[in-house]
Image (cartoon, grey):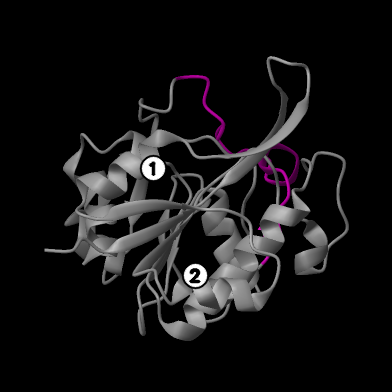
Amino acid sequence: MTKPLIGITADSLTLTNSRGALEERYFLKSALANAVEMAGGQPVIVPFVKVSAQARGLLLRLDGLVISGGDFDVDPALYGERRIPKCGPANHARTKSELLLLKGAIKKGTPVLGVCGGAQLINVCLGGTLYQDIPSQLKGCRPHSQREPHTKATHLVKISDGSLLRKITKSGEVMVNSTHHQAIKKIGRGLSASAVSPDGVVESIERRSGSFLMGVQWHPEFLTKTGKQAAIFGALIR
């Protein structure tokens, strides 16, 4: 039986090779690929695309798409705000690529899961906004960038009644890791919040009609030993 082909968006870096030459490379944390494979999918790394035709061509071959996280922030100009000093650096080439893929996937009805920055991008793509920096813009919030390893869950999130996430996890709460300094502010069109942390920060968004479209602010790929977390990838595959 052929496994569903799940594209996972790549990150990029520039490094110096053993001969002293600079090289541009794509990469992906193996935990995401492993989580997709464990759930019954066939993961493939998706490099940057530059135009919508490239995105459409890839999506014709993919059964699902994961928008991965990365060590950068979505440019505030994309949601109509000026950058504040605490906003991190952007990655314009990657964000453009992921928006092309995301818009194409939504139009085609390809199932999409956004992880961490991927959840934020889904929200922005559909007209939502972000808090550019939680510590400076949301006074009194708990720390959301843990010092512990990704494999350690550090805080609870409450899952909304009637949400798809509630059906997937079969629970009203789940323990998650937390490695972000931005968060969803205004929720995008057609989306709803399906999980929040005790301090009120939105931790998951979803579309409850149409094709599967979900974003989680944490990194479930590092917590798949817990059935609730593995079930998120299982839902994408189904």
**Mark 2–mark 1 distance (CA, rounded to whole Å):** 19 Å
Q: Is residue 209 shown above or below 70?
A: below
* Dot in front, 2 or 1: 2
What's the residue type where badge 2 is placed? Leu
Q: Position of residue 46 (x, y in %)?
A: 51, 55
229 on left or right of 186: left
Query: Can the viewer see residue 126?
Result: no
Q: Position of residue 236 (x, y in %)?
A: 29, 63
Quadrant assignment, res 224: top left
Label 1: element kind:
helix
Q: Is residue 126 shown above or below 43?
A: below
Quarter the N terminus occupies:
bottom left
What's the residue type where badge 1 is placed? Leu
170 on left or right of 133: left
Checking the image for residue 58, the label placed there is 2
Residue furthest to the left:
1
31 on left or right of 132: left
Quadrant assignment, res 76: bottom right
Checking the image for residue 32, the label placed there is 1
Q: Residue at x 21, y 52 (%)?
A: 231
- The answer to whether residue 132 is magenta is yes
Q: Which residues are magenta?
A: 129-148
Query: Can the viewer see residue 87?
Result: yes
Q: Position of residue 221 (x, y in %)?
A: 35, 41
Q: Is residue 76 shown above or below 149?
A: below
Who comes first in sequence, dot 2 or dot 1?
1
Q: Position of residue 198 (x, y in %)?
A: 44, 45
Magenta span main SS? loop
Checking the image for residue 90, the label placed there is none
- Looking at the picture, tell me which residue is in the foreground, 121 or 38: 38
